[in-house]
Amino acid sequence: GRRAAPRASATAAHRAFNFSAGPATLPLNVLEKAQAELVDWNGSGMSVMEMSHRGPEFISILAKTEADMRELIGIPDNYKVLFVQGGASTQFTAIPMNLCAEKKGADYVTTGAWGKKAVQEAARFVDAQTVASSKDTNFSSIPDVSSWEMRDDAAYVHICANETIGGVEYKSTPDLGDKVLVADMSSNFCSKPIDVEKYGVIYAGAQKNIGPAGVTMVIVREDLVGNAMEGTPAMLDWSTAAENDSCYNTPPCWAIYMCGLVFEDLLAQGGLEAIEKKNIAKAMKLYDAINNSDGFYSCPVDEACRSLMNVPFRVVPNELEKDFLAGAAEAGLTQLKGHRSVGGIRASIYNAMPAEGVDALVAFMEEFKAKHS
């Protein structure tokens, strides 16, 4: 079958273009740096995987990772950066526990599967209500902020900035005045500039856009730390991580180190504005291929909120999708199967997906269409 174009190095020639939604493709130069340092980090005689998390070597890695993350995103000094475990799903529990001590309710805007899971989890502990939802459009759009039925006394308003399964992404930060905005950014974190001051809390699992599975980043305004409801487990109380520099217990050292290499790489590429331009160009190429296919391919998402990171589409007729996925895999284009809950095709084109990968996918799509039209 047709092979995807090889990449620059010898190693690259054997690498597939991996469109997985997470864990996801990582920059080859980052992987090669990690490979070179695997056995002996910086002359220490140890791998990062073997170091004490309280030793000077790992403490320096953690400090640099946070400093680079702060510089890359522009995180103000009055925000804490926490590196925790348990994925974004554990923060679904931690968020109401940390923010609703005064028995206040929590407002949720649901634009897909992850927003739904977040509000369901919060409702186990607090009065969590869905104040806006795009369920009526089968989660293919974002309700206009003017329609959100927010409560004056709610502790916070929660959004999922990018729905990984449905491919729905906020294109701007909702203006909610002085309300505490909480955002799950797991799948578009560091894909574009972030105005941190508009948020009370930003959280993201690393394994989509930043690093391997195992670490979750929480950016939280200082005044929101230290107010957890009574009975909050120590590991869910943000103050535990904040007061112990994310080292209350052993942190996911290797995952943090890998994220640090990715932050370093993103800074070297010119920061988040430069990254956003690359991401827009890649996504537009793919959406154009879908839009210009005379209906052979279709994307269910409203054009106003189509994700730059996760592009779901169908082949019409749907029966051809099995052949499409098999042919794509043969061409070195892997992990394109849509989420099990929705089916179809999904191309996740995170920061680390090179433009050549999208070009190869578009070429395969055109070839497949010509064969089956």
Image: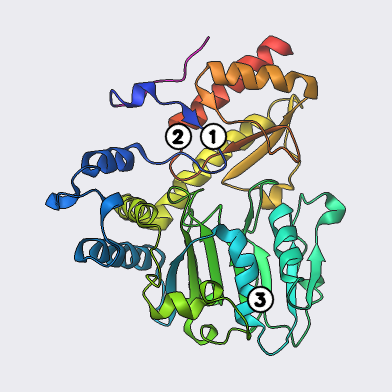
Q: CA distance from mark 3 to mark 1?
A: 33 Å
- Residue 185 falls in image quadrant: bottom right
Mark toward the viewer: 2 or 3: 3
- Residue 287 showing in the rendered view: yes
The magenta segment: 1-8
The reply to whether dot 3 and dot 1 touch (C-beta < 8 Å) is no
Q: Main secondary structure of the magenta part?
A: loop
Q: Which quarter shows the C terminus?
A: top right
Task: Report crowding for label 2: few under 14, some 14 to 19, many 20 or more residues within 10 A (C-alpha).
Answer: some
Q: Which residue is mark 2?
A: 355
Residue nearer the viewer, 84 or 14: 84
Callout 1, which amino acid? Phe
The structure residue drawn at horizontal position 68% and vertical position 35%, both measured from the top left corner, is 338
The image position of residue 43, as x and y in percent, is 12, 50
Q: Which residue is mark 3?
A: 96
Residue nearer the viewer, 266 or 54: 54
The structure residue drawn at horizontal position 44% and vertical position 47%, both measured from the top left corner, is 212
